[in-house]
Amino acid sequence: MALSGAMGSGISGLKAFMNALNVVGNNVANVNTYGYKAGRVTFKESIYNTQSVGSAGSDVLGGTNPNQIGYGTTVGTIDLDMSTQGLESTGRTEDCAIVGDGFFLLGDKNGVDTDNLNTLSLSRVGDFKIDDDGYLTDGAGNIVYGFVTCSNSGATPGTTPSNTVSTQLVPLRLPVADDDGNAVYPGVNGGVNVPPAGFTDAISYTNLQIDTNGRITCTNGMTKEPVVVGYIALGTVTNPAGLTKSDGPYYEISDSAGDLSISTALSSVTGNLNGDPDMPLLEGSTTKIMSNYLEQSGTDLATEFANMIVYQRGYQANTRIVTVTDTMLEELINMKR
């Protein structure tokens, strides 16, 4: 029945505008969610029924255009605006916001292999704290990854190991304390932060600071000596909008996002990631980390309310198509009476 095409187009419009309203509703619901990236809907035309094809002109007659009837619309894309948003002061030294491109890298205490970096989660929300084992974690208990001050990086065999920042990507943890409370720095091996044998408890600390390079420093609570814990790592991908959202503020790396590159803020640490010459640390980064801040939500209420009105009217117009088509079908059926 010919009128079913109009009915189908109207129904497709209802579905598309309802999905668009769902995106608006989610944006508005997250207006106060730190690090939230607002979604944007684009529509695309649905399939077409070709009633006649076009033809080229001849010596006698002109050409003709194709005749096609569409079957409505559908959601084309739901894009995320991954740009940096405004910052909100929190007054917490451990809170960090990224100004520029990049994400914090989060995982567990077991480390990560350079061949499987995609197991790490990405986040723009730096609600960090030091847990009871001395690890730097986010609000959900995930471990923040970076580059630690260690005792076996760059040491010459037969000499006293020097304390330098490793380029192995590892879970960030405070150094452990010896019997006198002195900081004993870990070793790193295969992407794991390895405490020295016989030492397990992290140092006590005061005056924890995180600078724009992502460098974590504190004061040893026992000896009052300065301690450089390490640097927070940042990850960037070719196409941030291609990341897949998971629960909470986390993103998973999908094929559409491209390759993951590792750096530090303002490129304060350089070298080869985990000793792999094929994975150099990103150089020339201008992204910085702001301590005492968290990134605000990307929801713009004025834009969302305007979109809500447009989508509501679009939905309303498509209901008219459905009801008018229903009336015409009723008239057609009544012709038999």
Image: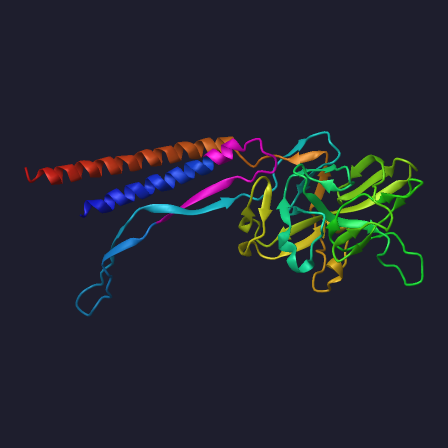
**Residue 14 horizontal side relative to residue 241, left or right:** left
**Residue 223 horizontal side relative to residue 85, left or right:** right
Question: Residue drawn 29% across and 53% down?
Answer: 48
Boundaries of the magenta span: 25-45
Question: Where residue 260 appears, x then y in whole percent?
Answer: 63, 55
Which residue is most to the bottom? 59
Query: Is residue 188 one of those drawn in magenta?
Result: no
- The image shows residue 278, relative to residue 10, as above or below, that is below
- The image shows residue 214, relative to residue 284, as above or below, that is above
Q: Quadrant of residue 131?
A: top right
Front residue of this view, candidates 253 and 10: 253
Q: Quadrant of the C terminus?
A: top left
Question: Where residue 161 appears, x then y in whole percent?
Answer: 90, 56
Query: Is residue 30 one of those drawn in magenta?
Result: yes
Which residue is most to the front? 198
* Scheme by which the image is coloured: rainbow
Count how many numbered circles sit on residues in the image. Answer: 0
Front residue of this view, candidates 52 and 117: 117
**Residue 68 horizontal side relative to residue 306, left or right:** left
Question: Residue drawn 24% across and 61% down?
Answer: 53
Question: Where residue 144 appears, x then y in whole percent?
Answer: 71, 45
Question: Where residue 220 appears, x then y in whole percent?
Answer: 88, 38
Q: In which quarter of the image is residue 314?
A: top left
Question: Residue drawn 48% across and 42% down?
Answer: 40
- The image shows residue 73, relative to residue 307, as above or below, that is below
Front residue of this view, candidates 160 and 198: 198
